[in-house]
Image (cartoon, rainbow, N blue to C red):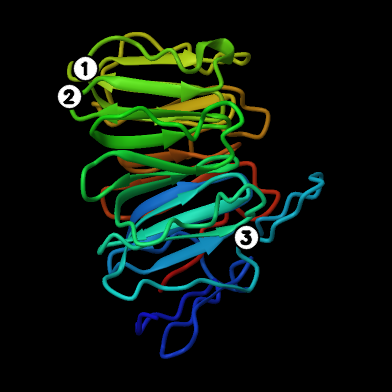
Amino acid sequence: MRTSMLLLCTGLLACGEEPVLKAQPAEGCPVGSGPWTAVSAGMHETCGLLTDGSMVCWGSGECPDCVVHAPLNFLQHIEWPTNGTWAQVSAAYLHMCALSTEGEAVCWGLDDQGQSTMPDGVRFQQIEAGEYHTCGIRADDQSVMCWGSDALGQASPPEGSFVDIELGWDHTCGLKDDGTIACWGDPTDDKNVAPDGVFREMRVGWNHACAIDDADRLVCWGSSPEGSTRVPEGYSWLAVSCGDDHTCGITTDGETLCWGASDRGQANVIPGDRWVQIDAGWQHNCVIDEDGYLGCFGWNESGQAEVPSVE
């Protein structure tokens, strides 16, 4: 357990006490404080990292229409890293994972397919949560290791060295150290048919994926019933993120654009200063600006788009 002097309005108490992640921001807490360094938007929940390496999560993690219910955040005790602070967090469907600066990883939430059961004795440089599977890049040899459901081969990675790994619903894509992309798992809609070329960034959504090459060109592939893979023309791209049936990107001029489905407002970008980070969840998104201000927009049924104060 890590000791901190922070008292977060979401109920994270770390002043010598066991850390607890509550479902909703406390009543009366203002929205939009910071600074934040990273954010991960899932389905019914969101997690963010602060400049001191602490983590806070919000949204209930509840799915009223789901047969299986996993309360991801509500009064759930998270085992803190024994060394270092939080370096990365990944929110997905009904489970979440986080990685410490020392390579220690922890997952929590639904574990019916073993997706939250960590392999013993392995250090990671990245960890990502999918629907019912989880993958990480090993710190020792940069190979990909996956666990959980492998019904469509989504947890059976190819050999090689990787610098990034991204998980969708039932498929997985990895960015290799030579800049090429490999995808595996569900072949529907050619989700696992990666484009040729060398890329610097890659993101995977529920059923589609996008990547940016060294010339700042954006290409997307996979399922696109609402136009999520139809890239707006005439732009150079700094960053991209993929949700369910929508995509969001930040141009090199600092403009943030979203396209595809917007029935929950997920493609209606909130106004603000220059956004430098964006993460698309199932039907909501979160953005961070140059000063560490964090804002979220889109579906908010479980409070997943209500950013808590960290003052």
Tell me the quadrant of the picture where the N terminus can be found: bottom left
Which residue does the numbered mark 1 point to in the structure image?
A: 198
Q: Nearer the viewer, mark 1 or mark 2?
A: 2
Residue 11: image location, x then y, percent: 55, 76
- How many neighbours does mark 2 have within 10 angstroms: few (below 14), some (14-19), or many (20 or more)? few
Q: In the rendered view, would you say 157 is above or below 190?
A: below
What secondary structure is marked by label 3?
Answer: loop
What secondary structure is marked by label 1?
Answer: loop
What secondary structure is marked by label 2?
Answer: loop
Which residue does the numbered mark 2 point to in the structure image?
A: 178
Amino acid type shown at disc 1: Val
The residue lying toward the viewer, choosing from 246 and 128, is 128
Q: Nearer the viewer, mark 3 or mark 2?
A: 2
Tell me the quadrant of the picture where the C terminus can be found: bottom left
Residue 44 as seen in the image, left or right of residue 92: right
Residue 177 as seen in the image, left or right of residue 55: left
Question: Which residue is pictured at 65% across the width and 68% down the height?
Answer: 74
Q: Quadrant of residue 111?
A: bottom right
**Cα gap from disc 3 to disc 2, whole angstroms:** 36 Å
Amino acid type shown at disc 3: Leu
Question: Which residue is pictured at 45% across the width and 59% down the height?
Answer: 32
**Cα gap from disc 1 to disc 2, whole angstroms:** 7 Å
Residue 210 as seen in the image, left or right of residue 243: left
Residue 171: image location, x then y, percent: 51, 27
Question: Which residue is pictured at 58% across the width and 52% down the height?
Answer: 95
Question: Which residue is pictured at 41% across the width and 22% down the height?
Answer: 183
- How many neighbours does mark 1 have within 10 angstroms: few (below 14), some (14-19), or many (20 or more)? some
* Numbered circle sitting on residue 72: 3
Q: Are marks 3 and 2 in contact (CB under 8 Å)?
A: no
- How many neighbours does mark 3 have within 10 angstroms: few (below 14), some (14-19), or many (20 or more)? many
Q: Are marks 1 and 2 in contact (CB under 8 Å)?
A: yes
